[in-house]
Image (tube, coloured by chain):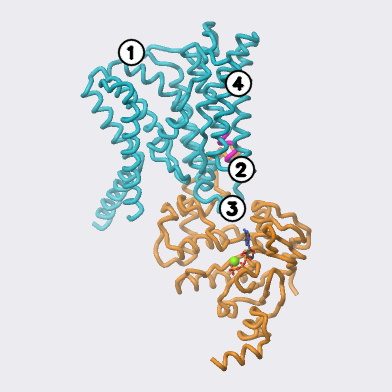
Chain colours: A cyan, B orange
Amino acid sequence: MATVTERLEERRNWWQGLSASPQVTSLIILAVVLAGFSIANPNFLSPLNISNMMAFLPELGIMALAMTLLLTAGEFDLSVGAVFALGPVIVMLLAQQAGIDIGFALLVGLAVCIAIGAVNGVIVTKIGISSFLVTLSMLLIVRGTALYVTQGFPLKSWNEPGIFVSLLAGSFQLGPFKLYVSLYWFIGLTLIAAYILNWSKLGNWISAIGSNRNAAIARGVPADAVKIGLFIAASVLSGLAGMISAFRISAASPVAGTGYELEVIAMVVVGGTALTGGYGTILGTVVGAFMLRAIRNGIVLIGVPGLAFNIFVGALILVMLVLHAMLSKRGARR
Amino acid sequence: MSVEVLRLEGIRKSFGSVKALKSASMTLREGEVVALLGDNGAGKSTLIKAISGVHPADGGAIYVRGEKATIRSARDAIELGIETIHQDTSLAPDLSIARNLFLGREPVKLPFLGVFAPIDFPLLRQAASTLLKRVGISKKLDADAAVNTLSGGERQSIAISRAMQFAAKVIILDEPTNNLGVEETHGVLRFVKEMRAAGHTVLFITHNIHHVFQVADRIIVMRRGEVVAEQTVGDTDLLSVEALIMGVDAATLAEQAKVH
Ligand SMILES: Nc1ncnc2c1ncn2[C@@H]1O[C@H](COP(=O)(O)OP(=O)(O)OP(=O)(O)O)[C@@H](O)[C@H]1O
Ligand SMILES: [Mg+2]
């Protein structure tokens, strides 16, 4: 008898724990948002529109995954949107102007991203300047470089098919949906990021560093090396996302990804990851990425004037954050 | 006389113009409990931070079992068998108790994956709950609970049980009974005695002189960044120890006590 009530009690606690968790809140709100848009305009769920959303989603989503890990460790990166532009710009320049093999050009592009991330990470950890200031400066440097080397003009389109183009931006038909392989990249990277954060030794270190850096260091956790690695991951994944995008629309623009840094950080915190570090959720980030894409897309469909977009996006983000804050307060009092 | 485990010679450490440690020297032997005493700001925490690699020393030498050791990071110290529980928080509040207990030395499956290796969660939980039972925390704690849901005393107990598990040669406790209730305080003192019985060396920083007489074999007194006295507990009494800490004559102190 006692065991039965105990078990019921356990189940209730489990459910309470789950419903207070930020991921579940985000999921519920996502469902509400999706339902709202589809009632307001049935075209929202049309195959064409869903395909459309799915084309954009992985590009920002991939950046958001790395940003989640970085935020969990207590840092963030404002230069990701600029790297999103510079990565493919370098690749296209090398491949088109210099006639270098596209595979090699991609490697060089990624190497530049690694270097940008490493510089961010080393300055933040070894010199001790806040990541806000370091990556803000890096944003200007990287964006400026992209503009200068292209003289401000988008690079002419790249139409030669090849293995790399299909690997990054190939498309396929799934029932009524036209999907891009970038979706596979997103799914694969999501699984890797979730594994690292929740199940690996490294994930334990990342959360510990964000939660109490000194405690982590006192246990022998190489906090600086972990952070530098995460800055590199953020840069590389942003460059990769930029290349995917550039191949998909077959053009590399020096102004691509403007403002993405804030969009990506919004996705991450709307999902429930703490801006102050110590707690991160990949599932939440995926939900957050869906949510922001759905909102941007849905707002157009239901006929909100283009210039009023950001009012709604900003307001919805605020609502989400307030909900998280209220729930985590309730959770802490338990 | 038993084997020397840790010897410090002329350890120096400055923070800018503040000379926190001028020249600190001491020797710890196997199986003894040494109380490190001194007033606020005497340099006790700074000294143990130098030994534990958190703030490596500017100068001086450290010998572990007679061999010269270089301690530049916390990892160095841990690998030399020196476990430290710091005065300021040593836990990550957002992580669960179990994750905290094994932070930096997580039990993993597939260890060849390095930092990407998956944590062995069943083992982690099991080891954590065994450990929690040993510290004698009155309330039953859930190993999956986040540390930020615990009281200050409970957190301290968790940090102490973490030092217990790896059975280090030298265990350093910086004011471990601060904020603890009666039962937890006894748990800590019992732990110190257990460690000595098992042959470990314990360096124990405290402001509570009664605790010193309960568990310590020797006392070392620091004042303004230097070791100023060393005594065997059996050869001294409470008043003389207090006088040493304050840097006054024991007779003067006794006089003062009479006046008030
Ligand atoms: N990180 C630091 N930066 C600057 N000064 C420091 C730092 N840590 C300690 N100090 C200074 O070094 C001196 C010794 O400090 P320490 O913490 O070692 O004292 P303590 O003996 O542990 O004192 P308490 O009993 O109050 O804990 C103090 O004057 C303190 O202000
Ligand atoms: Mg101290």
Tell me if residue A79 comes above or below residue B12 in the rendering.
Answer: above
Q: Tell me the element at label 1.
A: loop
Q: Chain of mark 2?
A: A
Residue under label 2: A125
Q: Is residue B20 visible?
A: yes
Prevailing secondary structure class for the magenta stretch in the rendered image:
helix
Residue at figure coordinates x 63%, y 29% from the top left: A115
Q: Quadrant of the N terminus of chain B?
A: bottom right
Q: Are marks 2 and 4 in contact (CB under 8 Å)?
A: no
Residue under label 1: A175
Q: Position of residue B59 (x, y in %)?
A: 76, 59
**Is residue A143 covered in magenta?**
no
Amino acid residing under circle 3? Arg
Q: Chain of mark 4?
A: A
Q: Residues within 10 Å of mark 2 (few under 14, many from 20)?
A: some
Q: Position of residue B230 (x, y in %)?
A: 71, 77
Q: Say yes or no: labels 1 and 2 on the same chain.
A: yes
Q: Mark 3 near ligand 1 (CB under 8 Å)?
A: no
Q: Nearer the viewer, residue B81 or A272?
A: A272
